[in-house]
Amino acid sequence: MIIMKFGGTSLGTAESIQNVFRIVSERMDRDPVLVLSAHAGVTNSLVEVARTAPGGDADVSKIEDFHRRLLNDLDLPVDLLDEQLGEMADLVRGMALVSEASPRVRDLLLSFGERCSTRLVAAYFKQQGMEAQAVDAFEIGLRTDANFGRARPLADDGRIAENMSKIEGIPILTGFLGRDADGNITTLGRNGSDFSAALFGNALDASEIQIWTDVDGVMTADPRLVKDARQIPTMSFGEASELAYYGGRVLHPAMILPAMEKSIPVRVLNTNNADNTGTVILSAYEESGAPVRAVVHKNDIHLVNLVSPPMLQQHGFLAKVFRIAEAHEVDVDLVATSEVSITMTADRADHLPSFCEELGELGDVTVEPDHALICVVGQGIAHTHGIAAQVLGTLAEAGVHVRVISQGAIKVNIGLVIQQVDLHEAVNRLHSHFF
Ligand code: ADP
Ligand code: ASP
Ligand code: MG
């Protein structure tokens, strides 16, 4: 069997859902299991509702109208999702009553995006004469810890495959969602449906995990930033995970591991151009000649500087710093140290004040917002001389100031931090240089 994951961008309109049906019906011989995101824009709207609900200002009508319009456009009963939409509205009223949006309740609210999209698409498939069943991942056995908003999956004990064997027709699974040991619904983090697809692929021993999106595959840079970005035909798991981790949002970073564990090829495909072969990610690396495969980036990076003269000759200083980062759930992507200072990147703007306050016990802390991270990715970087020199030379010519640079131990990437204002110029210059 294969996993076919369709992202929100592939489910945004009636036409795109009709297109998804065509794509799936042409692949029935491969025994597809579908994993779906919420329709484009719905999760963002739910995030906004979660923010405003405790103050009593939330408006769910936009989300209700969106789904009813889509049902109407597809000639499906407009009351098909009344149960889910009603539950959602009740929850929002409850949040206003108690003036609270705990992480647990927030995840419950966000779950309605995928719970609606799977039911709507399953109903459309049935209307077209294809047997299909919407399945909630949290009912079928996708178990996670209770880290709401970014839950981590627990090892599968075989129950997913066992439960799935009882489903009639094509299973249409919710992406993004799981359940903790107490029965609460959890979410796997934004963009997490890719991760769900890989977890189901692993649990069901899929022969391929297909990620259907709105571009022709993984590209040499984000096509929204670089006009002449090119499609990459094949990549290694190592390259793909660096690319995903350092910003290529086309894939969720955590999805590579479950696929790699069972050597299941991941194929990234375009719903608007289904005949294109897309990008295949495999364990065996195929030498392409070029050492650099992609230039990716991440926005909204904060630089945190810690200056601490006592750090000199002190054992375990970095351990203390990272224990604090862990306690405040701040992910550090890049770090540079000297004898008396540390500069690191931090991603969670919401957790920064408390993180910096505790860090202040170790030395003087300053924060520089408005930075971006660029990552030059390629397996060939490990055995090609002078890539770092080319990267720095190109940026120097462009007048871009580099704040931090790092090369990882597995040597498939060079990471740099620059100012946000320089991002467009820097990525485009590097892309022209290497491609
Ligand atoms: P989906 O709804 O299918 O999950 P996403 O918006 O999450 O879609 O991911 C697809 C988008 O990722 C593309 O439209 C593109 O703008 C962006 N992207 C960023 N970096 C890359 C890259 N290196 N290759 C391809 N797409 C990229
Ligand atoms: N719907 C979720 C989000 O927008 C998960 C996903 O689309 O992958 O983040
Ligand atoms: Mg996505």
Image (cartoon, rainbow, N blue to C red):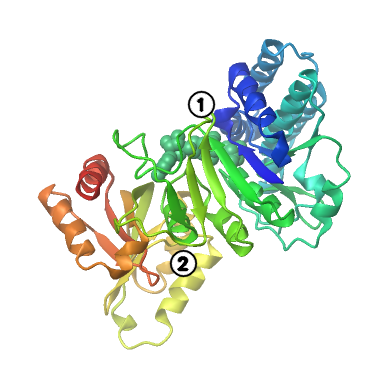
Residue 233 percent across, percent down from the top left: 42, 46
The correct choice, above or below, for 75 with respect to 154 in the image is above
Is 327 left, or right, of 168 in this rendering?
left
Q: How far apart are marks 1 and 2 (CA)?
A: 49 Å
The correct choice, above or below, for 257 with respect to 48 in the image is below
Q: Which of marks 1 and 2 is in front?
A: 1
- The type of residue carrying mark 2 is Glu
Taking the view exactly as shown, the residue that stands out farthest to the right is 166
Closest to the observer, 231 or 50: 231
Local secondary structure at mark 1: loop
- The type of residue carrying mark 1 is Asn
Residue 37 percent across, percent down from the top left: 63, 36
Looking at the image, which residue is at 62% across and 64% down?
A: 261
Residue 221 percent across, percent down from the top left: 34, 43
Task: Identify residue for label 1.
Answer: 272
Looking at the image, which residue is at 59% across and 43% down?
A: 210
User: Earlier along the polypeptide chain: callout 1 or callout 2?
Assistant: 1
Closest to the observer, 270 or 375: 270
Residue 119 percent across, percent down from the top left: 76, 28
Looking at the image, which residue is at 35% across and 48% down?
A: 297
Task: Identify residue for label 2.
Answer: 358
Residue neighbourhood size for the residue with mark 1, other residues' Cα within 10 Å, grouped as few (<14), some (14–19), many (≥20): some
Q: Is residue 41 visible?
A: no
Asked if ligand 2 lies within 8 A of label 2, the reply is no
Tags 1 and 2 in contact by the CB under 8 Å rule? no
The correct choice, above or below, for 198 with respect to 305 in the image is above
